Image (cartoon, rainbow, N blue to C red):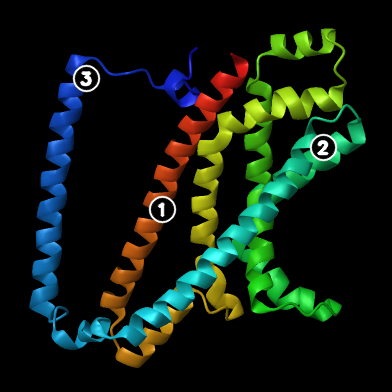
Amino acid sequence: MNTSSIRDALYESPGPRAKRRVRFFTLLALIGIAALLYVIIHQFDITGQLGAKYWSFFARYTTWRFLGQGLLVTVEVALTAALIAFAMGFLLMRGRLSPVLIVRGISTALIEFTRGVPTLLFIYFFFLVVPQMGWKLSAFWKITFPVAISACGVVAEALRSGVNAVPKGQTEAALSLGLTNLRLFYKIVFPQALRYVIPTLIAELVIVLKDTTFAYVVNCADLMQNARVLISNYDALLSIYLVVAVIYILINYLLNKASDRLARRMNRSGAKTAA
């Protein structure tokens, strides 16, 4: 049974010559990166940015505990926003595929609106306008809701592309067996569509995580906000932002690895089910 994914279909395995070129350019890129890092570190040394006063506070437990508290809030906001975005995106996707013209039109308009408006504008709306309507939201929800709304349109289009990628023959075969449209969608179509778009959804989660850095607007004590507090206390902008950047890079790397692993696992599970 073939367990290849859409990614495997789009990017075929390279041949021997292509592999040699990949290794050569990879080595060339590593040398270039190493040279760039040397220049940067040397410049830091010249300007005194490698001095002990800019780095010594990282040896304190309180510094990492403070950053860890902010990281926990960042992860909570990102995961909550991702779940809300998935739920809203699913509803918009169902509306976009609806045979009812009005429902399809409204869903399409909402998808294009959420995809077109910058996340920061949604944040300002929840921060400045929503309180005037009498809705008192905590800082957590003032950043979570706008980030989720900004992402739901992309999620809806990703899910719709996955649904459209399911072979029509399976739909016709299921209908011929007497399955209703509702059971057909949830038993046959959507599980396969979800396997197709797992990498895209994880990539959108990475974007959601990056959008949480706007939390400073609503005074939410996330990782970036706590980093700004440390900068004001220790006057060490460069070192703190470098450490925070490394933390974000590691999180995004782990998310990408989880995406690959989950996609392979779901493909194997789907193959066994089909067999």
- Residue drawn where x is 53% and y is 79% of the image: 221
The image quarter in which residue 31 lies = top left
| Distance (Cα) linking label 1 and label 2 | 31 Å
Query: Residue at point 85% right, 30% down?
Result: 98
Q: Which residue is mark 2?
A: 95
- Kindly report which numbered mark, 1 or 2, lies closer to the viewer in this rendering: 1
As helix, strand or loop, the secondary structure at mark 3 comes to: helix
Q: Position of residue 79 (x, y in %)?
A: 58, 58
In-image side of 46 versus 191 (left or right): left
Label 1 environment density (alpha carbons within 10 Å; few <14, some 14–19, many ≥20): some
Crowd around label 2: few <14 · some 14–19 · many ≥20 (10 Å): many
Residue at position x 46%, y 20% in the image: 4
60 vs 28: above or below: below
Judging by the rendered image, the residue that carries numbered circle 1 is 252
Q: Nearer the viewer, residue 240 or 59?
A: 59
Instruction: Quickly name the residue at label 3.
Output: 18
Query: Which element type, helix, strand or loop, lies under badge 2?
Result: helix
Q: Is residue 120 above or below residue 70?
A: above
Between 89 and 65, the one nearer to me in the picture: 65
Foreground label between 3 and 1: 1
Q: Amino acid at mark 3?
A: Ala
Whole-number angstrom distance, CA of label 3 to CA of label 2 = 44 Å
Q: Is residue 196 left or right of residue 9?
A: right
* Tag 2: amino acid: Gly
